Image: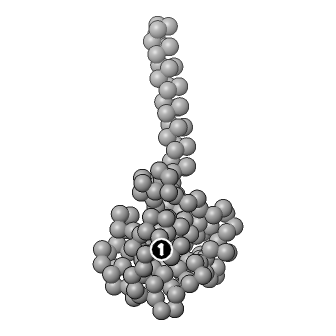
Amino acid sequence: MSRFLTRIVVRMVIFSIVLGVSWFIRQQKGATTNTVLPASAQAGSYVPAPVAGDARQTWGRPETLPDHFARHGSDFHARDAEDYAAQANAFLQRAKANGLPAKRDRDGSLRVYDRATDTFGAYNADGTTKTFFKPGSPSYFERQPGETVDLRASR
């Protein structure tokens, strides 16, 4: 093989490796936020998720978190239960910032839905998470109990 062809092949291999590594890094960085947040939320109104370990403070009944993660974590490509809980908390913060559709029940429970991502979250009166998942039914939120509330007004 001529020296010219060898250089071309080496450059193509190096380029392929760099391209593959950069793709992998982007996938790892965007795996949690891109699945939950639309582009408009990523552009500036997104409130960062709590750091690992915060699930004890953001999940209403921590003993139920492993089960919820097992059933719904894959909906959000969550790495683990902590990541899933963090995404649920970030969803509530984004809902408040962007005024997503929400209902409040008599006991103070809050239910939030984002039609664009088919994401549903239910939260206790103290703001801790009850559940977080993708219902897969356009009418799921409408069937939930509670009175409609404007989350931007109640922050």
Q: Residue at x 50, y 7 (%)?
A: 3
Q: Report x, y in % for residue 68.
A: 53, 76
From the viewer's perspective, tell me whether residue 59 is left or right of residue 2.
Answer: right
Q: Secondary structure at mark 1?
A: loop
| Camera-nearest residue between 72 and 58 | 58
Q: Residue at x 42, y 79 (%)?
A: 149
Image quarter of residue 142: bottom left
Q: Residue furthest front?
A: 153
| Camera-nearest residue between 72 and 132 | 132
Q: Report x, y in % for residue 92.
A: 51, 70
Which residue in the structure is indicated by mark 1? 153
Height in image: 37 above or below 154?
above
From the viewer's perspective, tell me whether residue 136 is left or right of residue 16.
Answer: left
Q: Report x, y in % for residue 22.
A: 53, 37
Q: Is residue 79 visible?
A: no
Q: How many marks?
A: 1
Q: Report x, y in % for residue 113.
A: 40, 73
Q: Residue at x 46, y 8 (%)?
A: 4
Q: Is residue 5 visible?
A: yes
Q: Amino acid at mark 1?
A: Ala
Q: Residue at x 48, y 92 (%)?
A: 106
From the viewer's perspective, tell me whether residue 59 is left or right of residue 119.
Answer: right
Q: Residues within 10 Å of mark 1 (few under 14, many from 20)?
A: few
